[in-house]
Amino acid sequence: MNPASYLLQGGSAVVVGTGPAIGRACVTGLAEAGANVACLDVDPEAAQASAAAARDLGVGALAHAVDATARAGVRSALADVADALGSIDVLINIVGGSRWSLAGETSDEEWDLVMQINLRQQWVVAQEVLPHMIRAGQGSIVAVASVSGLTGSTRHGAYGAAKAGLISLVRTLAVEYAPQGIRVNAIAPGTIVTPARAADEGRETKVPLGRRGQPEDIGHAATFLSSAAAGYITGHVLVVDGGVTAKHSLVDL
């Protein structure tokens, strides 16, 4: 394969949720591949820091403070990005989070919040970017899901259901918008070293590769799925978990 097919030289990408871990790794991965990047985050300082990291790699970058759960703000920000960069070729949506409780004890408020930040906002952001990609006749959307959407786990009732719903949404969008040249894929990370997952320290003993993932592992995967190298991949869930979901939980000979 021509190495140039991995590049996004001159392309325009949007990363939603560009905080200091996975989101920023996606921004720098896209920038290293040559894409100009718009960094959207509810925290304006996080968006600015990610945009600065992209500029340091020699590409153009914008920063917008956006609440991904608010449709009007998302629509306005994406319109601004399309005007500034000329198009939106790639969308990577990192936003997510949870409250952990037994399914039988999860409150209505917890359930609704987890669905809002993991599933509903992904639907909203995808809906708002689609018109830009349809006009261009091409595009790539990458949603960050989780291995929790593929398997069951204690205290993951709401979170797992939201991520499973996101995976289903990704596959539906992939089928519906393939005729418009738009690819839609998901990444399902396992345990990744981030500030939000500090409590996972020590879990590398359960990972076949013997380590927890780094944000760059997800950034590289997202950049690949966004690039021409993945041009025949759509509706796919790329599991990036060091082999955790490949291992039989009952047999270890």
Image (cartoon, rainbow, N blue to C red):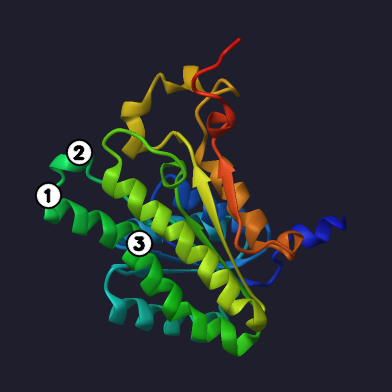
Residue 210 can be seen in this image: yes
The residue at 46%/42% (across/down) is: 147
Question: Circles 3 and 2: CB distance less than 8 Å?
Answer: no
Circle 3: element type: helix
| Residue contact at pointers 3 and 1, CB within 8 angstroms | no
Image position, residue 123 (x, y; %): 39, 70
Residue type at the position of mark 3: Leu
Left-right relation of 71 to 144:
left
- Residue 190 place in picture, x, y as percent: 48, 37
Badge 1 element: loop
Which of the two labelled residues, at mark 1 and mark 2, occupies the earlier sequence position? 2
Residue at image mark 2? 101
Residue type, mark 2 in image: Ser
- Which residue is located at x 42 percent, y 53 percent? 164
Q: How far separated are the C-alphas under marks 3 and 1? A: 18 Å
Instruction: Quote the CA–CA distance across marks 1 and 2.
Output: 9 Å
**Residue occupying the point 32% across, 69% down:** 66
Q: Earlier in the sequence, mark 3 or mark 1?
A: 1
- Residue 199 x %, y %: 31, 27
Residue 32 in view: no
Residue type marked 1: Ser
Disc 3: which residue: 119
Cα–Cα gap, marks 3 and 2:
18 Å
Quadrant in the picture for the N terminus: bottom right
The answer to whether the residue labelled 1 contacts the one labelled 2, judged by CB atoms less than 8 Å apart, is yes
Q: Nearer the viewer, residue 103 or 23?
A: 103
Residue at numbered disc 1: 107
